[in-house]
Amino acid sequence: MKKIILLFIFSFLLINCKDVVKKEKTTGLITQKAMVVSARIEASKIGSEILKNGGNAFDAMAATDLALAVAYPFAGNLGGGGFMVYRKADGEIGALDYREKAPLAADRDMYLDNEGNVVKEKSTLGAMAVGVPGTLAGIFTAHKKFGTMPMSEILKPVIALAKRGVVVTKKQEDRIKNYQALFLKANKDSIPLSKKWKENDTIKYPALAETLIRIQQNGVDEFYKGETAKKMVSFIQANGGIITLEDLAKYEARWRTPVTFKYDNLKIISMSPPSSGGVALAQIMKAIEPYDLDQFGHNSTKSIQVITEAERRAYADRSFFLGDPDFVTIPQQELISKEYATKRMADFSFEKATKSADVSHGNIEIVESDETTHYSIVDQFGNAVSVTTTLNGAYGSKLYSPELGFFFNNEMDDFSSKPGVPNMFGLIGAKANEIHPEKRMLSSMTPTIVEKNGKLFMVVGTPGGSTIITSVLQTILNVHEYKMGMQEAVNAARFHHQWLPDVVKMEPKSFDKQAISELKDLGYTIDETTSRIIGKVSAILVLPNASLEGGADKRGDDTAVGF
Ligand code: DON
């Protein structure tokens, strides 16, 4: 009998140990007070150190953002732009738009030839692709309003990192290799990233360190009006671009009212136009709210169907209605209302896929990638910051100023160069997103904060072009509907539909074969073959005991750091 009892206890322990091990594998970093999750460990560390030294989430935002400009030139930037959504410990929420703008000399047809056709690469490669950068204005504007540490202090570890250099990861080695031909094409000469960098090499950024030192000494005007501005304009113009000193001097970040909506007992706070992120996320979530996703199961046929159909309808609207709110009128409240969602889903049936051609028209290619970057911060005071920042394509326009030490964006491609012609993410646009001097191009970036029962619950966002919105959506649903932890929710396989092309993109070899075959029978076209990455999420979850769990995407070098 004793033996049997011992055996029983032993087996019980073994089973429980296994559970613990299994759980450990899918649980992200847990900390008690504060956390930064970003695309590079160096940036997360610098942000977390700022918090440890008494700074708040907005101080850490400046530090993390600038550290990403050093450690992650693929997407971190001085020459790009971004969006920030915040929620302060007292519940105050807001959003900051530091999206790039079209230069004053831009015009609607600037990317068309005499026959009215889009000129290949003109909006993606080299100086003509560059929008007026917003990143420095964004960082300084947020810091001025909410920061507590002097910017000169915040910049210190960032400058030290640029001088000391950054160790190349395997993923980075591969990325740098992939873009060699385009670096040469855009710059007509080699640039520091042109060398054959290998994993574990250290890349130093002395020119960028000098630029950052000037910004440390002279503040944000250094970038928009000072010596850096002058160097930047003469460099861009020497390479055939149209940005002027006036463009830089006129640039301002804008405070916006975030998009907010309810989903069950959650309140979602996300980015407003000129990003489509918050509006599209709201439209999709409102459309799926009446369905029992948790009963259907994670990535089950029925869940995929409902989510896909909601996405199809939201992306069709995106391409027609959305653009820079300073230039176009957006029926935002109607688009995100429950009534509108019900109307849009009225013709959905579980019996058969809706055809995108019946929702609207067109037939185009999707190209998805992950060249933006997102970071999430929760500080020890309870403030939360969610930031997505980008150069648009990988290393932006590939145009790199050796003197200033950074790449310039190719955000102009996010405008609709010509109605109905897809941009690099396969997104098509209409009049609402046509080019106009000083207009901000439509974005999909979706920095988001979620409250549950009135308290901070999640900070989430991702790169991924058009797949950003659907990746943020699935991460929230994975936690709320499918009861996953943060890291597990980030790791889970993702799919994406964007109206056109009429295809459900799925991460390869990650979905249940039976679900795929059922979806095909229902009339869905599934593409598992060419998907690379659908999003690369950086997120933080507040656990029931108030500790924090990080979700750092295994698809990249993302890392959570905190205390
Ligand atoms: O603002 C946007 O929607 C795009 N420029 C984001 C680009 C992006 O996510 C690049 N990586 N995929």
Image (cartoon, rainbow, N blue to C red):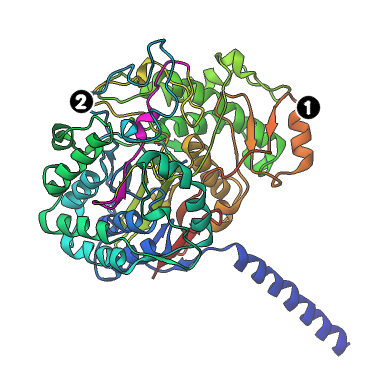
**What number is the disc on residue 104?**
2
Task: Report whether residue 543 is seen.
Answer: no
Residue type, numbered disc 1: Asp
Q: Would you say the beta carbon of the disc 2 residue lies within 8 angstroms of ligand 1?
A: no
Q: Crowdedness of circle 2 by 10 Å Cα count: few (<14), some, many (20+)?
A: some
Residue 302, image x, y percentages: 69, 34
Q: Is residue 286 left or right of residue 260?
A: right
Q: Nearer the viewer, mark 1 or mark 2?
A: 2
Q: Is residue 557 above or below residue 421?
A: below
Label 1 Cα crowd, 10 Å radius (few <14 / some 14-19 / many 20+)? few
Which percent across, then down, holds residue 540?
44, 56
Q: Secondary structure at mark 1?
A: helix
**Is 411 in the magenta?**
yes
Residue visible at 29% across and 62% down in the picture: 381
The single residue placed furthest to the bottom in the displayed view is 2
Write down the region rendered in magenta: 402-420
- For the point 11% across and 46% down, the residue is 226
Occupied quadrant, residue 434: top left
Residue with the mark numbered 1? 521
**Picture layout, residue 89 above or below residue 301:** below
Q: Which residue, as the protein is rendered here, is positioned at the far right?
A: 1
The residue at 39%/28% (across/down) is 122
Of 177 and 247, which appears nearest the observer?
A: 177
Residue 67 visible in this rendered orientation of the protein = yes
The amino acid sitting under disc 2 is Leu
Between 32 and 188, the one nearer to me in the picture: 188
